Image (spheres, helix red, strand yellow):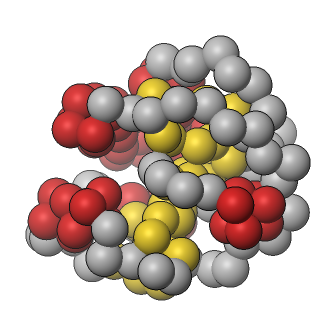
């Protein structure tokens, strides 16, 4: 099977807001409302995914499982004009396997997926095996969303 990438743009969650203007430091009510919607959606999405496949969330190089709230967080999901965004990747799998970087994950993973934030803070990228059970579940879960192909993974 081939590894594929799917981008989930936040415009699928905030239908009435231009998500290219999401800035985690912005206190505008419409921006705060959209970011809150994305945070709530992300928390539920992760909860459903982890429960369905008995997965846990890990940093690429740490065997300590993370909480959903570590990914459903402003600093991971949204850009900041003042602080920019720190690009981060996490593996979501049943057990921890250490990877040096995103490319070694693509080359060596056996199960699960990799989730990465977008450098502009407009969505998230999910990488997984095409036609795997998680891929088919994801397509069904996101059937109301417009999904884009994610950019190739780099270190």
Q: How many dots with numbers?
A: 0
**Quick check: 143 left or right of 16?**
left
Image coordinates of residue 152 in percent, x first then y, are 68, 79
Q: Which of the pair 4/87 is nearer the observer? A: 4
**Any part of residue 56 in sight:** yes
Is 86 left, or right, of 105 in this rendering?
A: right
Figure quadrant of the C terminus:
bottom right
Q: Is residue 36 visible?
A: no
Point 13% across, 65% down: residue: 140
Q: Residue at x 52, y 65 (%)?
A: 127
Residue 10, x across and y down, in percent:
39, 59
- Please tell me which residue is depicted at 30% across the width and 58% down the height of the picture: 134
The picture places residue 53, in percent across and down from the top left corner, at 28, 39
Vertical arrangement, residue 112 with respect to residue 28, above or below: below
Residue 154: x percent and y percent? 81, 70
Q: Residue at x 46, y 28 (%)?
A: 56
Instruction: State the image quarter where residue 61 is shown.
Output: top right
Is residue 13 toward the left or the right of residue 38 in the image?
left
**Residue 142 in which image quadrant:** bottom left
């Amino acid at each position: 099977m081939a590894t594929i990438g799917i981008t989930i743009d936040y415009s699928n969650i905030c239908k009435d807001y231009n998500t290219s203007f999401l800035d985690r430091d912005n206190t505008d009510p419409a921006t705060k409302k959209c970011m809150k919607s994305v945070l709530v959606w992300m928390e539920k999405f992760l909860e459903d995914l982890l429960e369905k496949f008995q997965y846990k969330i890990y940093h690429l190089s740490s065997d300590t499982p993370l909480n959903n709230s570590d990914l459903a967080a402003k600093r991971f999901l949204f850009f900041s004009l003042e602080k920019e965004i720190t690009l981060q990747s996490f593996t979501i799998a049943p057990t921890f396997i250490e990877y040096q970087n995103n490319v070694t994950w693509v080359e060596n993973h056996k199960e699960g997926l990799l989730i990465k934030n977008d450098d502009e803070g407009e969505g998230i990228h999910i990488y997984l095996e095409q036609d795997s059970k998680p891929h088919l579940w994801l397509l069904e879960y996101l059937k109301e969303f417009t999904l884009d192909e994610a950019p190739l993974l780099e270190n």
